[in-house]
Image (tube, rainbow, N blue to C red):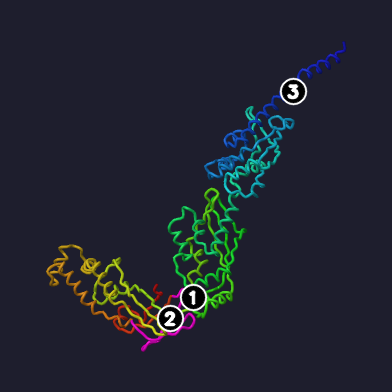
Amino acid sequence: MDRSFVRKTAAVMAIVTLLPMFSSCSLFKKKAVLTAASDFVSGISSGAATDILQKTDGLEKEYKKSFKDLLDEKNYSDEEKVFNTHMQAIVSGVIDEKSVKVTKDTATVSITFTSADLEALQKGDYKDINDLASAVDKADTKETEITVELKEIDKDWYVTNFDDQEFKDLFSFYGNMPIIGRGTLIDTATKLAKAIVEDESGVAIVLAGSSADDKTIAAVKDAFDVDGKPTDEQKAFQTAVRSLMLYDVDTSTVEIEGNKGKVQIRISRPIFEVLAGKSFKSIPEIEQAVKNCEIITYYYDCKLERDGSEWHITNLDSEAFAGLLTYKKFNISLKSVDGTYKATKDITDQFIKYISKEYSVNIPSGCEGKINIKSTMVLQNGKFEVKIDRDAFVSDIKSFVEKNIDRIIQNTLGTTSAVGLDAMAKIAGYKDYADMKQQILNQVTTNVETINVSGLESSGTYTVDGSSITFKSSSDTTTGTIDNFGSITVEAKITDPDARKLLEAEKILMTYKKAA
């Protein structure tokens, strides 16, 4: 027999014998890769960060931490948790078994992942989290084919490209919940804007929500001047202003973060302030004057907070909101400025300074009580009279001294000791401290009874020119101002030397408000 033929035959037989062994080894690895891929898909579908990362290798420590944080429910609000749960439930993967390629200790396999279309969901408008969750369950899905790379380590296979962008996109819904309540936020702001131009304070209070505190409710009522008693001409003025008011909610300014939101409201209205101090002969003349005013637009950043599906406005107690309704308190009248006005001036600090300087008395800080100068000004048919309530002034001084006499004496003498006070009182010629205190009070009473306030009083004639009012007495001429709300502010000359000494001023500034 030909030896060459025998050798060739033996070689062929050896190859034939080994082929099944090689084939069996390759098949085993492919099966192991598919098992690893299946476990990986299960982890992805569950959304369990630990399970997923256990099937990976080669990831940076920081990346692992950030991924765990991304899937950690402690980092999300209750609404976000609901959204994440519904989105995660849709995530799934299908392995293309025919795509498996194994080369020694590395392999690749194609997996098609299915997820809800986040981009489409972001374009929706949802009134509450239940509405959003329902939308997620019914959402269109998208498929993403990812070539997953694996490596064999100690006979187990691990995914090595989990930090690829495709996987990041797969979990991008975490931390990106669609905005909830955009439409209802705009509706709420629109209701407020409408309430402003239609003078509906009750609607504004409702929009503040049932949890609004007393301060907010009081602020809304004050802004709308709920307790005001406008005259017929004021009512006509307000109606004329409202007839020209327009509102708009700028939807491009909507900002929502979780359950807090903001949107800008624009209110246009006549610049009625130019009518301050002007005289009108009839209501139609007032209405026409309002119509002739130029228009100005005010901007109000309306801040809101969502509770479920309802938005409540949280800054109705702001100056910006009150500024939209100043016309409610604007003073306009067919009548003259005639009437009775009241003013109060706190001179406590000046009194303390004066007494301390004149009588070498050390009055401590934080004394109880106030000393006020209360003045009444009567305007009638071009004549004025300013009177000071002397009795109230004297009473304030007595009360202040009585409330603080112990502190004043003790601070002046430098002791609070009862024994020390009695001793010092006896040295001064009194029976004891009680006797000294009483005699001082008696002296104060005697002295204040001689107070003359005539230097702060005056009378004469007045004239009005727009928002300016001029007072002319026998000794002086003073000009004051009438503000938009009917208050008169005047800086009057002090004619009495003692009053000038007490107040350390040549003039006294008083703001008079019309008595009800």
The verdict on residue 289 being magenta is no
The first of marks 3 and 2 along the sequence is 3
197, above or below 446, in the image: above
Give the image quarter of residue 360. bottom left
Percent of width and height locating residue 248 = 60, 63
Q: Mark 1 Cα within 10 Å, few/some/many (few <14, many 20+)?
A: many
Cα separation, mark 3 vs mark 2, equals: 109 Å
Q: Mark 1 belongs to which amino acid?
A: Ile
| Residue at the (29%, 66%) spot, across then down | 368
Percent of width and height locating residue 439 = 17, 72
Q: Mark 2 Cα within 10 Å, few/some/many (few <14, many 20+)?
A: some
2, above or below 337, in the image: above
The answer to whether one can see residue 62 in this image is: no
Q: Which residue is mark 2?
A: 480
Front tag of 1 and 2 = 1
Foreground: 52 or 173? 173
The answer to whether one can see residue 281 in this image is: yes
- Residue 23's disc is 3
Kind of element beneath mark 3: helix
Percent of width and height locating residue 51 = 58, 34
Q: Mark 2 belongs to which amino acid?
A: Gly
Q: What secondary structure is the magenta-colored segment mainly?
A: strand
Kind of element beneath mark 1: loop
The verdict on residue 479 being magenta is yes
- Taking the image as shown, residue 81 lies to the left or right of residue 469, namely right
Q: Which residue is mark 1?
A: 332
Kind of element beneath mark 2: strand
